[in-house]
Image (cartoon, helix red, strand yellow):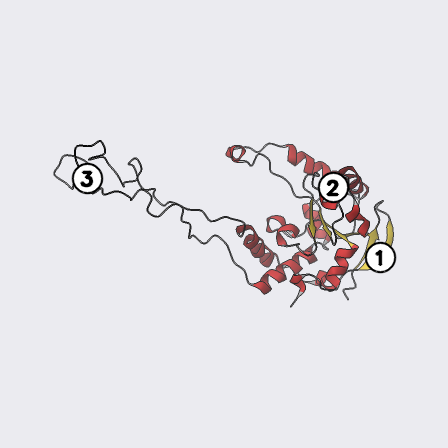
Amino acid sequence: MSDIKRPILDLEAQVVDELELPEVFLTPVRPDVIRRAYLSSLTARIQPQGRDPLAGLRTSAESWGAGHGVARVPRVKGRGYPAASRGARANQAVGGVRIQAPRADKVVWERINRKERRLAIRSAIAATASLELVSARHRLGELKEVPVVVVDDLASIQKTKDFHGFLLRLGLQGELERLKRRFRKIRAGRGKMRGRVRQRAKGPLVVYHEDEGISRAARNVPGVDVVSVRNVGVIHLAPGGVPGRLTIWTVGAIEALREEQVPFLRR
């Protein structure tokens, strides 16, 4: 057992019981391993894209060489038709090759060993129990202990206003204001033209065991993410590769960790 105890809160943010956290919360926090696992998860989302290797080269063009009083650009063979003697192949020619074009076979996915990835997830879970790391990322307000453990009724919340009210009762008003302020701010620069109008700050993470409506209730709160304990990963627990995200666990999710019902706890 971990000997780390946390109070169990109800939906009114009142203490109803006490829970001893599983041993996974005693895992040493390894920021280097967490960062590597985060980059692996991030790059795994990138879809490979590139250019046709023969683009701009499907022509019979050859350079005339020196002594003709024209540039030594490859020119289309033939005579008597419009394309004859027209420049081709060169990067400055119409329909020519592109210099250093993206290649579809470029390796963009930073792979990571299985045991290393599982260590990173366990380490990121342990970081959610560090008040020093969590307070460096979030405005905790009245919260004095992390992680927050809540009864399973949290997963049954159906409406956004009920979930928002629960966060306010936890004392996270300053955190919600920070998330709302960042969400309203328009990004400076070219990113606005490329679908990245806003930089969204990351707020609390809710980890549940069985979804009974919480994912729909929380999806309209800026910065709040909801994930099943079976699917939780470093990309949820340590956004940006920085450990210490404020995490709200349901009792069922904690028990799933204790009983090792999730893949990353298997040795």
Q: Nearer the viewer, mark 3 or mark 2?
A: 3
Circle 2 SS class? helix
Between disc 3 and disc 1, the foreground one is 3
Q: Are marks 3 and 1 in contact (CB under 8 Å)?
A: no
Q: Quadrant of the N terminus?
A: bottom right
Counting from the top left corner in percent of width and height, residue 253 is at: 75, 56
Would you name the residue on which mark 2 appears? 217
Mark carried by residue 149: none
Q: Which mark is residue 18?
A: 1
* Quadrant of the snapshot with the C terminus: bottom right
The three-letter amino acid code for the residue at tag 3 is Lys
| Residue most extreme to the left | 67
Q: Residue at x 32, y 46 (%)?
A: 54
Q: Nearer the viewer, residue 26 or 108?
A: 108
* Label 2 vs 1, first from the N-terminus: 1
- Amino acid type indicated by mark 1: Glu
Q: Position of residue 24 (x, y in %)?
A: 71, 62
Considering the numbered disc 1 on the image, is that residue within a helix, a strand or a loop?
Answer: strand
Expressed as whole percent of the image width and height from the top left, the position of residue 22 reads 75, 62
Tell me the CA gap for discs 3 and 2: 67 Å
Distance between mark 3 and mark 1 Cα atoms: 84 Å
At a point 77% along the width and 39% down the height, the residue shown is 159
The answer to whether residue 143 shows anywhere in this view is no
Q: Residue furthest bottom?
A: 267
* CA neighbours of label 3 inside 10 A, class few (<14), some (14 to 19), many (20+): some
**Hey, which residue is sitting farthest front in the picture?**
81
Disc 3 target residue:
77
- Residue 266, above or below 221: below
Frontmost residue, 98 versus 209? 209
Q: In the image, residue 194 lies at what x, y percent?
A: 52, 35
Instruction: Give the side of residue 21 with respect to residue 265, left or right.
Output: right
Quote the CA–CA distance across marks 2 and 1.
Answer: 26 Å
